[in-house]
Image (cartoon, helix red, strand yellow):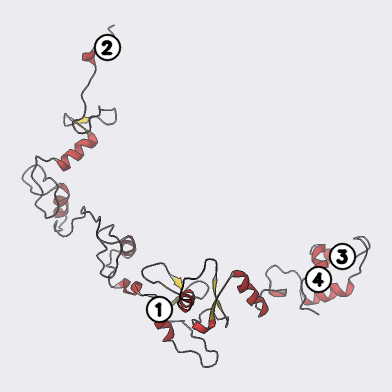
Amino acid sequence: MADITACPAAIDTTVCDVCGKPPEPDNRLKGGAHIRYCYQWRRRNDPTRPKCTTSDCGRPARAGKSALCDRCYQRAQRGNAPAARPFHQRNKGETCKVEWCTGEARKKGWCEDCYGWSWNNGGADPTARRYRYNRTVQDVVALVLSIEPDPITGCRDATGVFSTDAWGYPVASVAGKASTRITRLVVEHNLGRPMMRATHACHTCDNPPCVEPTHLWEGTPAQNSHDRDTKGRGARGVTHGRSRLDPDKVRAIRARYVPGTNQHDSNVAALAREVGVKPQAIRDVVRRRTWAHIE
């Protein structure tokens, strides 16, 4: 049996005319001179074929009597005008076709946000719907000041004027960005600068829907928690979700507590088993580290 590896004539040296690569088992030559992927590219970009008659298209026309390229021909077959912004037209360097939007066009002439809204709403035009996203911080503050304050508390309740989040705080979208709490926008407007990271827009009135500028201040989480505790709004006693005691049990523990020099002399362990808590919880109650508000 002859060794075909030693015979140059037995080796297929044919390569693709476009990329110069030899054919592979899963990418063989098609059309006699091009591998499969280059064949498709060549078919769309053959300079010897006439151009598509659709304006600004520039693709080669289909073989035969049609004067349109493959995609314009398919668009015409579906009953659409090929010149009415062909779906293969590129958006590079263009802005969103929504008049007030300045985002870069990505799909069908819209930016990612406008296109996503159109997709989620059955292909509706986002131009009329998204006008409110063009508001500035000054527009939001002007709308806040137009809310009549409560004659007793002085709070400007934004319920019904703005949407609210899961915690009851009013939110709005400014300059096309994601929804932001109105309280933060008001504080930033008062300060004349963006709020620092990891800070909260705190209320002096403890009323989440309130957007009155004089009732808001910038504070850290620790300052916000201290303000909550000093006003007695923190969860303590029976209002704490993990509490196993109540005022009657606390008074009974303090009345029945027997001090001792060690755990055997004291009745801390017995009291803990009786009320269903750990011995350290009994010590905290007796020493008033917890339940200090109960006499």
Looking at marks 3 and 1 on the same chain, the residue that comes earlier in the sequence is marked by 1
Q: Are marks 3 and 1 in contact (CB under 8 Å)?
A: no
Which quadrant of the view contains residue 54? Answer: bottom left
Q: Which mark is residue 285?
A: 4
Circle 3 residue: 268
**Distance (Cα) linking label 3 and label 4:** 11 Å
Circle 2 residue: 4
**Distance (Cα) linking label 4 and label 2:** 95 Å
Q: Which mark is residue 272?
A: none
Count the labels in the image: 4
Q: Residue at x 21, y 27 (%)?
A: 15
Which quadrant of the view contains residue 230? Answer: bottom right
Circle 1 residue: 140
Element on which disc 3 rests = helix
Looking at marks 3 and 4 on the same chain, the residue that comes earlier in the sequence is marked by 3
Q: Amino acid at mark 2?
A: Ile
**Distance (Cα) linking label 3 and label 2:** 95 Å
